[in-house]
Amino acid sequence: ELYVKKDEIDRILIETTGIADPGAIAATFLNHPAVIKDFELINVIGVIDALYIESWLSETEEAIRQIAASDILLLNKIDQISNEAKKNEITDLLSNINPLAIILCGQFGTFPINVILERHHELLPEIKLNNVSGELNNIHQKITTFSFTFNEPFVLAKLNFEINRLLFLSYHQIYRIKGIIAVENYPVKLLFQTVKTQINYIDGQLWTNEEQLISKIVVIGKNINKDNMYKFFQKCQSL
């Protein structure tokens, strides 16, 4: 029915239940051939209740998965918290779980719709990735976010095979992988992300003559060994 009316539609907004895993829906838009042909996934949006997010993160792993899967986090009821230090603590908590997400703080439940509807997968991931470094630890359920930098280009076939195998074997531990990489004999920056057990690639901007071919990858997951993850990606390079 939506396909028949697709020329009349500007946006399709899919609202899940509060306990749903958005990754399962996002994976359909990223990998199902019939859906990809006519529909583009622009953003995964998570709505966060600032008053209760800390307790929810302690009680359920699904809340962490939802934050990790989001491109935009709408922090609702933050205006009801008067303590500025507490506000910063909450935004830092979300950034530690998903440093690549845009965090928008609402006032009386109102958010900038123009920012929400923008396509953020082209330039913004590069800016956000460049601002993430090292290791971000979270006290909630041993969630860790790692950022890796590589100076050698990747072999795409090797990387694709190894990531698919990793997701198949460790999907319960890997919440999100996102990166901008240099690929051997490829003139543009390649943006990639994983959702559930699926991986998606998007061409980014051309590498300029002045730029070093530096790749940056962020991994969000549970009980992940940093050294093992670094070696995992390193073996996918054209060394």
Image: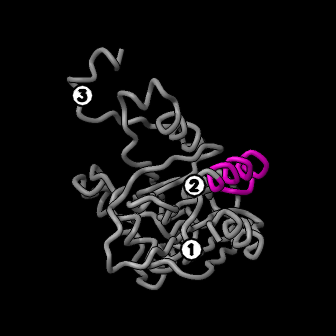
Can you identify the residue that label 3 sits on? 9
Q: Amino acid at mark 3?
A: Ile
Give the quadrant of residue 79.
Answer: bottom left
Left or right for 217, reference 225: left
Q: Please say whether residue 170 is one of the residues in the magenta stretch.
A: yes
Q: Amino acid at mark 2?
A: Leu
Q: Amino acid at mark 1?
A: Glu
| 224, 54: nearer the viewer | 224
Q: Indicate the secondary structure of the residue bearing disc 3.
A: loop
- In the image, which residues are magenta? 158-174
Quarter of the figure with the C terminus = bottom right
Q: Tag 3 or tag 2, which sits nearer the N-term?
A: 3
Can you identify the residue that label 1 sits on? 152
The reply to whether residue 75 is in sight is no
Q: How is the image coloured?
A: one colour
In the rendered image of this protein, does residue 11 appear above or below residue 76? above
Q: Tag 3 or tag 1, which sits nearer the N-term?
A: 3
CA–CA distance in space, label 1 to label 2: 12 Å
Quarter of the figure with the N terminus = top left
Left or right for 68, reference 107: right
* Residue 38 image point, x, y percent: 35, 27
In the rendered image of this protein, does residue 140 appear above or below residue 121? below
* Residue 51 image point, x, y percent: 50, 65
The reply to whether residue 204 is in sight is yes
Can you identify the residue that label 2 sits on? 156
Q: Please say whether residue 99 is one of the residues in the magenta stretch.
A: no
CA–CA distance in space, label 2 to label 3: 35 Å
